[in-house]
Image (tube, grey):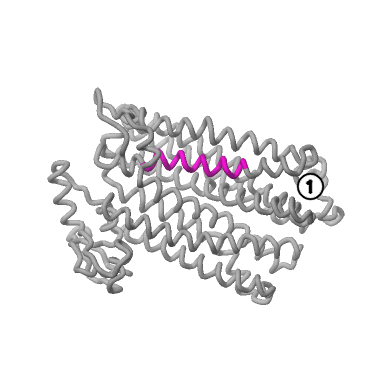
Amino acid sequence: MDTLMLARIQFASTTIFHYIFVPMSIGLVFIIAIMQTLYYFKGKEVYKRMTKFWGTLFLINFVVGVVTGILQEFQFGMNWSTYSRFVGDVFGPSLAIEGLLAFFMESTFIGIWVFGWNRLSKRVHLLSIWLVALGTILSAFWILTANSFMQSPVGFELADGRAQMNDFWAILTNPHLWVQFPHVLVSAFATGAFLIAGVSAWKLFKKQDVDMFKRSFRISIIVGTLSALAIMVTGHQQAQHLVSAQPMKLAAAEALWNTSDDPAPFTVVANINPEEKSNSFELKIPYMLSFFSYSKFSGQVEGINQIQAEYEAEYGPGNYIPPVRTIFWNFRVMVVSGMAMLLLGVIGWFRSKREKIMEKSWYLKTMVFAIALPFIANSSGWIMAEMGRQPWVVFGVMQTEDAVSPSVTAGEVLFSLIAFSTIYAILAGICVYLFVRVIRQDEKKKKIEPDQYDPFDKEEYHAVAK
């Protein structure tokens, strides 16, 4: 493989791994803030214990997420220096604001929250966790501001061979940002919710601290169900945006080689042959692609071959077709995962409301495995979003093959790919070990009562460890 392919693999692997932790942090801290709010208003110690238990998992996840995120920044200078020089004046400010404003806000108030138990008033301490939650959301917003520029570049001009920002407000009001950000945000809420629901389901199956984990499950399954429903709505809005903004991505997601009939059917599965630009087998649902694209049961959707001809006329000769198989199947994996989350959420909400959550052991076991659903949906969604933009790194402005560093060799990229992958594998192992240890903590502690245990107290932590 050449330098370009290795650099793409490295960025893809580190980004997907980092993105395991980002939505989990956003979702966890949001639900933790809800739990602490319940403690503030109701005054029940069980909500305090819930807040501290899930807060420990959040802190572990946050630390690992920070470490994995640092390498993301380095890659722009290491493997993508041509891209950084060309678009840095537009791309850089969003990353700088994310670091200087959002991340420092998160870090500061995490410290206040961790060390503020029994030192700050309940009101101030509650405010600190909500500010952490706000910081994680702002962090996601600024990162997506930068990514949305790559998907739909606005607010810039070309000068001296570089892209220079000339309208910061246009970047903030980028239409792509305002269909992408809500979708990513509710996906993050679902990620945190299903983690808490899955762990709580396991604890309920084991009949451990039933009161606390029943309450945890009820809160998380409500958030998870509403988030899964919102994912469907915001995903529908994204699809409609792609009709005009990135029609090639939408056509590839449907493996639609030629412009559809009116109304357009939705392809459920297909045997795709990219070499012949055709599908040998298709299972379709009539009218549905028109509905997804226009919110009505009529309307044509443009095909890959027709869009390719338009792009050649606009941008010059070249292959503007992304990897159709990859986009087609990742889109369906994302959709099926989202539908499964919604179904499990509705079942759990209904059974939890009727106080029958512990009567169905199959459901509790299923929810443990359902922890993976949001992560699968998030990863497949990002693969579709980023690979669907190919061959562009900045859509319509700069191609990916022109963005790679000219002086970096394939051997150097391969070495850093192996090194980063090794580091990430070690971090993953540490994170899983710590998660399991915290989750199983109350199975081992026999002499310390749950109401007295404080995982943020160093002396008590070591007592429990012993």
**Rendered view: 179 above or below 415:** below
| Picture residue at 15% right of the left edge, 49% below the top | 310
Residue 214 on image: x %, y %: 70, 65
Assess disc 1: are there few (<14), some (14-19) or many (≥20) residues with their C-alpha within 10 Å of its C-alpha.
Answer: some
Left/right placement of residue 20 relative to residue 358 reads left
Reply above or below: 14 against 222: above
Q: Where residue 228 appears, x then y in whole percent?
A: 50, 62
Q: Nearer the viewer, residue 453 or 274?
A: 453
Residue 243, position in %: x, y? Answer: 27, 55
- Name, please, the residue furthest toward the right: 447
Q: Is residue 465 left or right of residue 320?
A: right
Q: Is residue 9 above or below residue 350?
A: above
Q: Which contiguous range is marked in magenta? A: 131-148
Question: Can residue 405 be spotted in the picture?
Answer: no
Q: Amino acid at mark 1?
A: Asp
Q: Which residue is mark 1?
A: 454
Quadrant, the N terminus: top left
Choose top left, top right, bottom left or bottom right for residue 331.
Answer: bottom left
Is-magenta flag for residue 112? no
* 147 within the magenta span: yes
